[in-house]
Image (cartoon, rainbow, N blue to C red):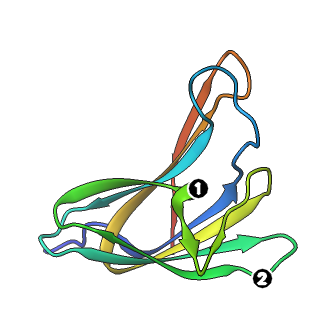
Amino acid sequence: MTMSKGHILWFIPDGYIPPESSGELESHESICVLNCYKEPARLSVTVYFEDRDPIENIEVTVPGRRTDHIRTSSLSRDGESIPKGVPYAMEVESDRPVIVQYSRLDSTQAENSLMTTMAFPG
């Protein structure tokens, strides 16, 4: 029996990049992608907002048999990017099965907080 390693569609419903950080570490969020296959995985990320149109088809490539931690603050298309202090959600679609995890470092206080969770496979 052959099993697929991952899924081609993932959802992350809770995103938020804090507008301020304290100390040396900057608050950030990352889409952590594992590609177990030899060929590169071509991702298309759509970012949804509460009060504006989404940023669609942000292209990211994860090399074969590699992992990539993609900071959400680095995602942009046609000059549009995710603003700090604004709630958002993401859809991650891949041309081959991948595994997606979501991580958030909150350094808004002296006591840093790290949260990570698996994205929801579609």
Q: Picture quarter containing residue 21?
A: top right
Residue position for label 2: 53
The residue lying furthest to the front in this view is 79
Query: Does the residue at mark 1 contact the one at mark 2 (Cβ under 8 Å)?
Result: no
Residue position for label 1: 73
The residue lying furthest to the top in this view is 110
Q: Secondary structure at mark 2?
A: loop
Could you tell me the amino acid type at mark 1? Ser
Image coords of residue 73 (percent x, y): 58, 55
Q: Secondary structure at mark 1?
A: helix
The residue lying furthest to the right in this view is 51
Mark 1 or 2, nearer chain start: 2
Image coords of residue 78 (percent x, y): 59, 81
Mark 1 against mark 2, which lies toward the viewer? 1
Residue at image point 73% right, 59% down = 83
Image coords of residue 81 (percent x, y): 64, 67
